[in-house]
Image (spheres, rainbow, N blue to C red):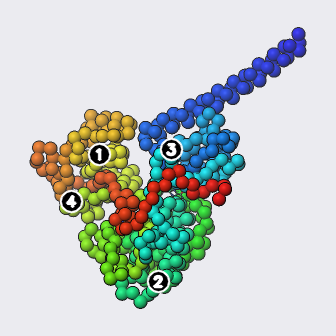
Amino acid sequence: MEEILIYSVVGLLCFGIMYIYLRKLKNESDVVTEKIVKAKEEGIHEPVSLYPYINEDNCIKSGACITACPEHDILGIRNGRATLINASRCIGHGACFHACPVEAITLKIGTEKRGVDLPHVNQNFETNVQGMFIAGELGGMGLIKNSVEQGKQAIDNINSAIDKSHNAQYDIIIIGAGPAGISASLQAKKNGLNAIVLEQDSLGGTVYNFPRAKIIMTSPMDLPCYGKIKLFQTSKSELLSLWKEVIEKNNIVVREHFKVDSIGKKDEQFVVSNSSGETFSANKVLLAIGRRGSPRKLGVEGEWMEKVAYKLLEPELISGKNILVIGGGDSAIESALLLAEDNKVNLSYRSDKFNRLKPKNAENILQAIEKGKIIVLFESNVTNIILDKVEIRVKDGNTLSLDNDLVYIFAGGELPTQFLEKSGIKISKRFNYTLLSHKN
Ligand SMILES: Cc1cc2nc3c(=O)[nH]c(=O)nc-3n(C[C@H](O)[C@H](O)[C@H](O)COP(=O)(O)OP(=O)(O)OC[C@H]3O[C@@H](n4cnc5c(N)ncnc54)[C@H](O)[C@@H]3O)c2cc1C
Ligand code: SF4
């Protein structure tokens, strides 16, 4: 009797532990399922570029990939297997790839259904257009360290191929001042090449657009004209200051706010121009333009002013201003909502209603309109931007003149693919394409 009692108690105990364990697993799975549902609603579940592909048959649920990933909620464990949550946020560190103890992760680009456009480049980083090269994330491989390395290598290849007896203004024009363009410009200096960097925005590329508090994860890298950068974790401001200092010290010419609109050829030399018709010529061109594309401009009077921006950085530092936000997509709505906390915000949108907004944004903007926190002008078009005003043509044909300190334009963008095709570069759509596997 005593034995039966002991066995029963032990059995019950085991059952209890098992029950608690399974319940915990189920709760964890439910949380991940909820996150996936939300990610799908927000359109960030599907990978857009590089992402970890999980071989479910090999996965043993160690969770090492999740611990190793420095970004949040890219991966989670559901029903005993690793799974993707916010896959579009993966930036390709590959920490998960290295951390998995059973090598169940492969890094891929493009899924079976959704292809990713990649330009044709040979092992020297040259495209099908002779003399036009590509370095950095545009070629498919992201991360600061990889971009720095590729910028350097591309210039070395250009240097060994260039005939300096050409009659162009420059040996090389580098388009884009992100990590790849910065490194390329320094390597060009080192090799005695006459180069100019053209950047549509500001020095730093994608890193310039990181939130102020973002911790940048990287590995030590060699920066030409500087030496080894022995950093594993750093801040945006530290990295930008370092790049700025090296660029200035080496007298590199970076022409900021110059958006390259077209690349043509004249007398065997490349002619690079912006939309105002300003041109530069060079014997070679290096495209280091990343994969984020260029914001679409409205083409209205006064758009060149400093108070006009195409992205919202550090909204917490903006208060007491009269602001016009232009656009009706999620970026416009999210920015208008953030700015409306401490500013007077008008939103101009050319359609008669918002379409395909994330459900949360649709709800929040409606509330903000009802509470009078944001004034929305549907079917309106900005016609003129002046120093302290903006002029907007509204539905009834009249023109409103509003007090204005800042304008934020969110009118979509031109993908790098469109720019590449315009420049004659061949593109292929890659589906389910393995960039890094344990078999390589
Ligand atoms: C949210 C986020 C977090 C990240 N975190 C990390 C991290 O922690 N560690 C890490 O190593 N990597 C990180 N990355 C990835 C890293 O930022 C990129 O891989 C890297 O910046 C790519 O460098 P790049 O020089 O190829 O391109 P980019 O940095 O994108 O630079 C391209 C430049 O070209 C310019 N340009 C584009 N078109 C034109 C044109 N027509 N005319 C003139 N200029 C043009 C752009 O304005 C831009 O400045 C992150 C990326 C994102 C989005
Ligand atoms: S590649 Fe990097 S960002 Fe993507 S899941 Fe792995 S560790 Fe996270």
Going by the numbered disc 1, the residue's amino acid type is: Gly
Give the Cα separation between the discs numbered 3 and 2: 44 Å
Q: Nearer the viewer, mark 1 or mark 2?
A: 2
Name which residue lies at 31% across and 72% down.
Answer: 273
Which residue is under mark 2? 162
* Residue 206, percent from left and from top: 45, 60
Give the Cα separation between the discs numbered 3 and 1: 24 Å
Q: Is residue 13 left or right of residue 47?
A: right
Of 361 and 191, nearer the camera is 191
Q: Residues within 10 Å of mark 2 (few under 14, many from 20)?
A: some
Q: Residues within 10 Å of mark 1 (few under 14, many from 20)?
A: many
Of 60 and 145, nearer the camera is 60
Which residue is under mark 1? 328
In the rendered image, which quarter contains the N terminus?
top right
Tell which residue pokes out farthest to the right in this image. Answer: 2
Q: Is residue 310 left or right of residue 183?
A: left
Find out if the beta carbon at label 4 lies less than 8 Å from the nearest ligand 1 atom: no
* Residue 315, percent from left and from top: 37, 51
Kindly state the secondary structure of the residue where label 3 is placed: loop
Of callouts 1 and 2, which one flags the residue occurring earlier in the amino acid sequence?
2
Depicted 411 relative to depicted 57: above or below = below
